[in-house]
Amino acid sequence: MSQIDITLDRETLIASFAEDYNKALTYLLTVLLNAIMRAESEEQLGAAKHERSPERKDYRNGTRDRPLTTRIGRIILQVPRHRNVPFETMIFDQYQRSEAALLTTMAEMVVQGVSTRKVSNVMEELCDTSFSRSSVSVACKRLDDGVQAFKERPLLDHYPFVTVDAKYFKVREDHRIVSKALMVAMGITADGRKEIIGFEAYDSETKNTWTAFFEKLQSRGLKDVHLFTSDSHAGLIAAMKKVYPKVAWQRCQFHFVKNIMDHTPKKEQKGLQSELREMFDAPTIEEARKRKDEIVKDYGSVAEKAMMTLDEGFEASMSVMYLPGTIRKILRTSNAMERENGELGRRYDVIRIFPNMESLVRLMGSVLIDRHHILSSRQGVFSETRYKEAVNEFRPLLIQVAYEQEKLLEAA
């Protein structure tokens, strides 16, 4: 994109902050977004304003006002116009997707009569307008189509590593408030880019619902996975092994440590956590096993149940040890997914209770679409060259791990 030049009126800005903080933020946001669109216009035209350039593709034709509803109020932007080819900007689509999802969900609550006075006040403050049933219906339909298309899209890329997790949200159903599980899958491509590859809402986490989730991913094209990372939910593991029996499972080390600490006396926790960290950071699986045996021996008398948990779950938490060090640390926990759950939770804090399952999928799906675009545009967490160099070496080892895990599950 061309360089973005921003000119602020100092007196206007100071007066706005002194008068109304929101007014100042509105002014700043308006100036910034107008500057971005001017830069986009220069890039599409191939020339700056009043510039003579052989690369010029078109000419300016003034501007038009277009409103944009944001969380700090309604602003009016000056959208450039071009003489021949229409000006294009991503600002309205990208900025408004999650914002519109939030607003329409809240508006739907108001329309259905299940909202509180607080929600109504927030609606007026955010939108500075009212919503009719028909306008809400149209807005929701537009969002639903986009979310559905994203959720059902074919998975054409290769995702060798996948992290899955579920987060619960409260939904109003049959005049009761119940919890619903939103299952999310994040894939890492062969060149290290993270993407949101799937999400579905279910009544709860069971083997059947997790099986449906994995089968949906499979039907959309998810194949040739080397490793799944997740917590130790029994239904999740059973479903994963049913749909992807030849894929190894990595138990999230962060959740594993929490499980161990739950059975450890408080005075022993700090020391044990330090020793577990050394075990996880061991350079080889053999050294990690040796360190584990030492920990079990040292803490067996003071934290017997914790050591049983460590001993039973150790191998599943060490599947990543068969991967190169540069890839290993990225996949040994589901922390990347936890960060995405944090983004979902931040939006959920505004809603508190969804009026129905559709609004849950609408808002959380819109947030996940935005997160997908942000994640996939970042630099890869490892290089494709490094992956290709190592895949033939670690792939057979992980298949053997998957086979052993399947046998253990059958014997349980």
Image (cartoon, rainbow, N blue to C red):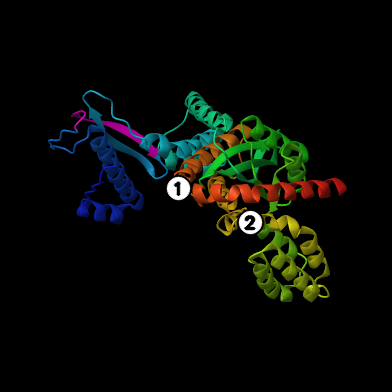
Quadrant hosting residue 115: top right
SS for tag 2?
A: loop
Q: Which residue range is magenta in the image?
A: 56-69
Q: Position of residue 383 (x, y in %)?
A: 49, 50
Residue at mark 2: 332
* Neighbourhood count class around disc 2 (C-alpha, 10 Å): few under 14, some 14–19, many 20 upward: many
Question: In the rendered structure, does residue 60 fall within the stretch colored magenta?
Answer: yes
Q: Position of residue 329 (x, y in %)?
A: 59, 58
Amino acid type at mark 1: Arg
Considering every residue shown, the one lying at the far right of the view is 411
Q: Residue at x 53, y 41 (%)?
A: 368
Q: Nearer the viewer, residue 96 or 67?
A: 96
Residue 257 higher or lower than 157, as above or below: below
SS for tag 1?
A: loop
N-terminal label among 2 and 1: 2
Q: Residue at x 64, y 39 (%)?
A: 224
Residue 246 visible, this angle: yes
